[in-house]
Image (cartoon, grey):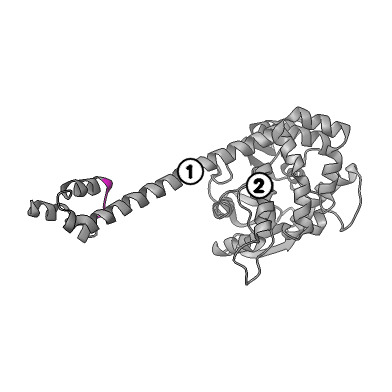
Amino acid sequence: MTTTTTATCSYLHTCQPPTIQRLRTCQTRHRFLPRTCAPVSRRLKLVVVAAAAETTRTMKAAEDGVLLKKGIAEFYDESSGVWEDIWGDHMHHGFYDPDSTVDVSGHRAAQIRMIDEALRFAGLSEDPTKRPKSVVDVGCGIGGSSRYIASKFGAKCQGITLSPVQAQRANALAAAQGLSDKASFQVADALEQPFPDGQFDLVWSMESGEHMPDKAKFVNELARVAAPGGTIIIVTWCHRDLAPTEESLQPWEKELLNKICDSFYLPAWCSTAEYVKLLQSLSLQDIKAEDWSQHVAPFWPAVIRSALTWKGLTSLLRSGWKTIKGALAMPLMIEGFKKDLIKFAIITCRKPE
């Protein structure tokens, strides 16, 4: 009995991994020897418990990821039509002179200006020999940025979104504007893009980074599909950078962001500085970042005003609860901005040649 037991458990004193089957075998054969085997049995139980806990965490993370993607897709399936009806086909913020006041037509012009300002900040040239020829629009909405860039540069643009409604509408608009040969759209995950390495001269992400649960994987995918020498542009909402003495945001800041996340199907926020560190870790070049919060400040009040019109209210009621919930969260965005918690950032870089 003693000889058999020693042989059975010899793996505990080697580098062999303690598989669940081995653990059970050892525990079974040691049940008659509590004095000598109790410490070993306790260690075995701890290993089993730890392995089970890790499996549970992995399964929960995968389940949360599936639910998040489903929620994002359904949110934009419901809300895209309302947005287009009121604001047009650019589903992002406008770029304004600070403290400016404009009407709805001015807001639409500001959305176009946002695209031009982002291209300018990244240093993209309109010289026919230098401008991008292939573009991926990551989180393309209904394709407004792609169609504008395709027309501006004569580039071929491919957009991806989690929303089937958005992809279908984006393709329909491209066809209606005679751009089917230049702009195409499909349902795909930004964290697992359906493109080969090094395909695009310009990798464009306009207000989609907020939805990414794994920012490192997101940035890695942007870099992967960028061609050597290609430009990456990320325009996104972030929380404020932490001070050197801080380890995390304050409790009230976390609470406010969590409320916003719940309404807009957002995972945890990150700071501009964290994005920059991720880009630096990939040895990307010419990394630049700037806070454009003041340039988008007039937008949220304008969205709220449009939602309170008869057209806005009836559109919201028709669209469904997810869209209404998002509309109700807009004052929270304004609160976060006024309290210097929420930042609207642009981060650009270039992939080495």
Is 200 in the magenta? no
Residue 297: percent from left, percent from top:
82, 54
**Quadrant position of the C terminus in the picture:** bottom right
Determine whether the residue tagged by mark 2 lies in a helix, strand or loop. Answer: helix
Residue that lies at the very extreme toward the top in this rendered image: 318
Name the residue furthest bottom.
245
Q: Viewer-proximal residue, 131 or 107?
A: 107
Residue drawn at the location 67% of the way across and 54% of the way down? 234
Type of secondary structure dominating the magenta stretch: loop
Q: Residue 18, image x and y in percent?
A: 26, 52
Identity of the residue drawn at 69% across and 35% down: 322
Crowd rating for badge 2 (residues with CA inside 10 Å; few <14, some 14–19, many 20+):
some
Q: Marks 2 and 1, Cα distance to the nearest angstrom?
A: 18 Å
| Cβ atoms under marks 2 and 1 closer than 8 Å | no
- Disc 2 marks a residue whose amino acid type is Cys
Q: Read off the residue under disc 1.
A: 60
Position of 171 with respect to 297 (left or right) is left
Residue 261: mark in rendering: 2
Bounds of the magenta segment: 16-20
Q: Is residue 17 magenta?
A: yes
Give the quadrant of residue 99.
Answer: bottom right
Q: Which is more N-terminal, label 1 or label 2?
A: 1
Q: 131 or 90: nearer the eye?
A: 90
Vertical placement of 311 versus 299: above or below?
above
Residue visible at 71% across and 32% down in the picture = 321
